[in-house]
Image (spheres, rainbow, N blue to C red):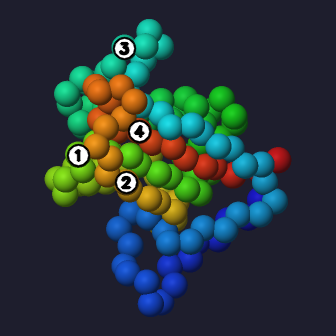
Amino acid sequence: MKKQFFNPLGLNPTNGFTHVVAATGGKTVYVSGQVSVNEKAEVVGKGDFRAQVEYTFQNLQVALASAGATFGDVVKITYFVVDLKPELVSVIREVRRKYLAPDEPPASTLVGVTTLVVPDWLIEIELIAVIAE
């Protein structure tokens, strides 16, 4: 499996993401949006954005592992954040540094939303990974 990371001239500088990621020769894994909910369907970190980001990344790690993938295999990540403000972006960046490779981060999209399907959820993250077959 081969991955290539491109940040073409003429596009804005990146901070924790890559503009274009190409992958060939592997199995694609799609992970549904994950939130800060435990195995008992309880919201973890209710009202605490940082706690929810951290637990959501832990849930993503479990989801990836179930398909034989790791965060190193992630090629695209999408964040949905309730009432997005600049200070929330710094929290996401801090937490994701623990999980995503800083030298070749995935392509990334961050979307501010007014609400998620459950009012106590503050962030939802979905991703795509490509692993060797």
Q: Secondary structure at mark 4?
A: strand
Q: What's the residue at 40%, 22% (across, down)?
A: 37
Q: Position of residue 53 (x, y in %)?
A: 33, 38
N-term mark: 3 or 2: 3
Q: Secondary structure at mark 2?
A: strand
Look at label 1 and name its amino acid. Answer: Asp
Mark in front: 3 vs 2:
2
Q: Position of residue 13 (x, y in %)?
A: 37, 79
Q: Is residue 87 above or below residue 15?
A: above
- Which numbered disc covers residue 83? 1
Neighbours of disc 2 within 10 Å: few (<14), some (14-19), many (20+): few
In-front residue for pair 78/69: 78
Look at label 2 and name its amino acid. Answer: Val
Q: Which residue was labeled with disc 3?
A: 42
Residue 37 can be seen in this image: yes
Q: Which residue was labeled with disc 4?
A: 124
Q: CA distance from mark 4 to mark 2?
A: 10 Å
Q: Which residue was labeled with disc 2?
A: 111
Instruction: Determine contact: label 1, label 3, CB under 8 Å.
Output: no
N-term mark: 4 or 3: 3
Look at label 3 and name its amino acid. Answer: Glu
Q: CA distance from mark 4 to mark 3?
A: 15 Å
Neighbours of disc 3 within 10 Å: few (<14), some (14-19), many (20+): few
N-term mark: 4 or 1: 1
N-term mark: 2 or 1: 1
Q: For residue 117, which quarter of the picture?
A: top left
Q: Is residue 25 above or below residue 33?
A: below
Residue 54 can be seen in this image: no
Q: For residue 86, which quarter of the picture?
A: bottom left
